[in-house]
Amino acid sequence: MLEVAQHLAGGFADLVQPANALALVVGLVVGMLVAVLPGLTLVMGVVLALPFTYGMPITASIILLTAMYISGTYGGAITSILFRIPGEPMDVPLLWDGWSMAHAGDPARALGWTLFAAATGGLITATVMVTLAVPFAKVALSFDSPEYFAIVLFGFTSVVTLGGGSLANALISLFVGMLLSTVGVDEIYGVDRFTFGVDMLRDGIGYLPVMVGAYGLGEVLVRLEQGFASAPPSGDAKVKTRIPTLAEAWKIRMTFLRAAIVGVVCGIIPGAGATIASFVSYGIEGQYGKRRALLGTGIAEGIVAPQVASTASVGGHMVPLLTLGIPGSGATAVILGAFLLHGVQPGPQIFQTQSALVYAIFASTFVAVLGMCALGYFAIRPLVKVLYLPEAIVSVFVIMFCLIGAYSEHNNLTDLWMIVVFGVVGYLFERFRFPIAPMVLGAILGPVAETAFQTSMISYRNDWTVFFTRPVSGAVMVLSAIALLYPFYARARRKRAVAVQHP
Amino acid sequence: MRERLRALAPYVVVLVSAGVLHLIATRFDYAPHAGRLGPDIWPRAILALIAGVCIFRILTVLRAPRDEGPGGGVLQDVLGNAPPARDAQPEPDERFPGLLALGVAITIAYVWLLGVLGFALASALYIGAMIRVGRYRRWRVIVPTALVGSLAFMFVFQKIVYLSLPIGRSPFDAVSLALMRLMGIR
């Protein structure tokens, strides 16, 4: 424990370096702006920032993206409460009680509860991250290729089954992403796969064009088809924040505790992002909260539950990312991309090889939470002004950032064609209700899964049972099977219930 | 019937593509090693899984076009009372497919024109055109935004980030070079 504290102190010292401090501040501001603007999603914002990290030191790059991620879980709450416009899907539950409290004449109190909840969730998540990461990494050090394959497979199945919508569509999206990752020269056999004689494809399809195209350009095309928002938001924006007293917060301590647990657990499970954490936490409050009957009428518990959970999920996500190299959400997939662009592979070894980097990230999380609160409290007025920018203008600049960002990787115009192709693919996915996150995770983790699979097959002489006979991989494979089969069971159960009600 | 065809279309397209790619995967050129599975096994397995899911969906849609099949949202389901997260993104009231087609066409033209007109000119045209396509009508805002935006991007990325942006072909390269000189970009 003392060793962790010493390393963490070193991490705080690293934050004083101008590049890291600047990255932190810029990340907080941009993350909050992105979350406030309804046309821009948090993941899209992190994706757009990724190409700018090429020329930055790795520590500053990861601090920038992590700070964006943290402040992004809070910024959208402001517009949910003041204007009834959720900046992010995770802010939708805040409409029910946050907007109601504001509408009833107490917006300052609603904003104060949100800020307090985000700070609590953020500090809890940072502490959990520091506490859990080292033991996680120690366990992961004993893993061999079958365990890695099983864990990646679990990541895939949970991403597919925890998101909403059709399971079949999520599976197709995942498989498309995995297939994209096979394009190019195969690493083990040195054979061209799906290159069709095109030189550019021999290097493979990078996850950057897939991410930037699908999340960035694709989202803008979806919004363009919907006609963009033309009118500025209506509503009385009384932008003051009144922080609740500790005595007020203590009264609903169980709400804080439940929400923090939900957030951290949802974060650790791959696929259950901040949005699911927020919705699930609100649902649990509706089930177990003391004042559950009043939920939706504008009570503090309805604000605290989703906000604590969504911010607390961030640290949970960072644990499997840092210790196993497995991202659990779109934003952490982008952060993994930043690690890989700088030639660093997150995983159990990272605590030995890049200990200073990891602890600087941990330290930055604590500072980012406090910075986010300060920004939310003092800069709320100019932040809200951003909402008055016409969406058509914001969107075209988003596209420009997407295109220049992709171009900057190789200084090659052909990369821009990739962005356009994946932008259209992203649009089609959205239009036909295929989720994008599984495709992106498939494109990133596909090579990890294939390498673990092929290595296992070579090491264990093509013995397929190895994935099931080793204790850890066997247990994780069973979990994956349960995750994948549960939707079928749930559907059958629902059908039976309907048949009983309407015989 | 139309609803059914619309629901079937994506799965049929994906299924046919998977079939074609599977055929290509069986023809990868490599020397087989004894005891090794080969480079085709992984993509073929993925393609087989895609085909399996598509066939499952096609059969489901043929039986009931509005049936989405088993859904995700497992946590919400297990917890019973949690609202589904898919409510977060409601269906829009109105769609503008013409704007979308125009937006895609303009973006394709922009990527093509970058090599011809150079970054500054092509970007100014693109920014202006896309803002207009996005149903924003105030030309007094559009024109300066397009010009200033294009030059700002050029300045930031060439002067500060040291990125080499396309200058275009003759005679347009002269404009790019003149602008670069004005901004002090070497």
Image (cartoon, coloured by chain):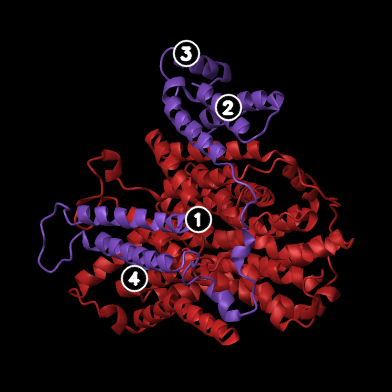
Chain colours: A red, B purple
Label 2 chain ID: B
Q: Say if B143 sits above or below A61 in the image.
A: above
- Residue drawn at (58%, 27%), measured in percent from left and top? B150
User: Residue A304, how many percent across, how many down?
Assistant: 74, 70
User: Residue A342, how many percent across, how many down?
Assistant: 43, 50
Q: Amino acid at mark 1?
A: Ile
Q: Amino acid at mark 2?
A: Ser
Tell me the residue that label 2 is attached to.
Answer: B150
Instruction: Mark 1: give few (<14), some (14-19) or many (20+) Cα within 10 Å.
Output: many
Q: Which circle's residue, 2 or 3, is located before the other in the chain?
A: 2
Tell me the residue that label 1 is attached to.
Answer: A335
Q: Can you name the residue that lies furthest to the right here?
A: A105
Which one is closest to the eye, mark 3 or mark 1?
3
Q: Nearer the viewer, residue B107 or A451?
A: B107
Residue B174: which numbered mark, if any? 3
Tell me the residue that label 4 is attached to.
Answer: A149
Residues at badges 3 and 1 in contact (C-beta under 8 Å)?
no
- Secondary structure under tag 3 reads helix
Figure quadrant of residue A418: top left
Q: Can you name the residue that lies furthest to the front here?
A: B1
Discs 2 and 1 share one subunit: no
